[in-house]
């Protein structure tokens, strides 16, 4: 599978990418949501792992843009965030439109659970 990670934290990008690569997946990285829409359009990703809290444009706004663009509206998106209360997770999925939610810090087990839900 091929994934895109959008996260302003180089530590979090590296940690998630390393785990996905160990599991045999291809991973691209972006450090901000600004300009990442084009990457999503041309990348043909199985899923995008998207941080919520980022400077310039947060993950919620980016996801709204993705869902409004016909070329990316069906893109599978997983929020990957330190915002992890049940209310925040529910908001990310039910209101913001993410397909899944992965609380930070991520573990191999939580990644594997999320990967199992991604359509092949």
Image: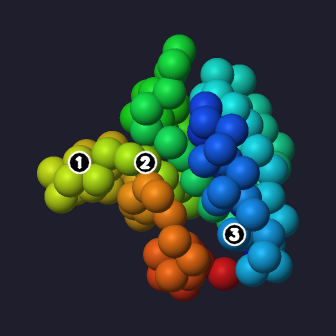
Query: Residue at left 58%, top 53%?
Result: 49
Q: Is 56 situated above or below 42?
A: above
Tell me the SS state at disc 3.
helix
Q: Is 86 situated above or below 41?
A: below
Tell me the SS state at disc 1.
helix
Tell me the SS state at disc 2.
strand
Is 51 on the left or on the right of 41, as rendered? Answer: left
Is 116 on the left or on the right of 93, as rendered? Answer: right
Residue 96 position within the rendered picture, expressed as x and y whole percent measured from the top left? 33, 43
> How many numbered discs, if any?
3
Label located before the other in sequence (2 or 3): 3
Q: CA distance from mark 2 to mark 1?
A: 10 Å
Residue 101 position within the rendered picture, expressed as x and y whole percent measured from the top left? 40, 60
| Mark whose residue sits in front, 1 or 3 | 3
Q: CA distance from mark 2 to mark 3?
A: 16 Å
Q: Mark 1: give few (<14), some (14-19) or many (20+) Cα within 10 Å.
A: some
Q: Mark 2: give few (<14), some (14-19) or many (20+) Cα within 10 Å.
A: many
Q: Which residue is mark 3?
A: 19
Q: Are marks 2 and 1 in contact (CB under 8 Å)?
A: yes
Q: Which quarter of the rendering shows the N terminus? A: bottom right
User: What mark, if any, has residue 81 been given in the picture?
Assistant: 2
Q: Is 25 situated above or below 44?
A: below
In front of the other: 85 or 91: 85
Is 82 on the left or on the right of 113, as rendered? Answer: left
Residue 58 position within the rendered picture, expressed as x and y whole percent measured from the top left? 46, 27
Residue 105 position within the rendered picture, expressed as x and y whole percent measured from the top left? 46, 58
Q: Which residue is mark 1?
A: 88
């Amino acid at each position: 599978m091929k994934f895109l990670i959008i996260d302003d934290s180089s530590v979090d990008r590296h940690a998630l990418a390393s785990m996905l690569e160990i599991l045999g997946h291809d991973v691209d990285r972006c450090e901000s949501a600004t300009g990442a829409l084009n990457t999503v359009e041309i990348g043909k990703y199985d899923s995008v792992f998207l941080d919520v809290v980022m400077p310039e444009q947060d993950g919620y706004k980016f996801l709204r843009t993705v869902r409004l663009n016909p070329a990316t509206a069906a893109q599978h998106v997983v929020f990957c965030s330190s915002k992890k209360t049940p209310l925040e997770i529910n908001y990310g999925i039910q209101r913001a439109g993410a397909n899944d939610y992965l609380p930070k810090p991520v573990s191999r087990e939580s990644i594997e659970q999320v990967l199992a839900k991604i359509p092949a």
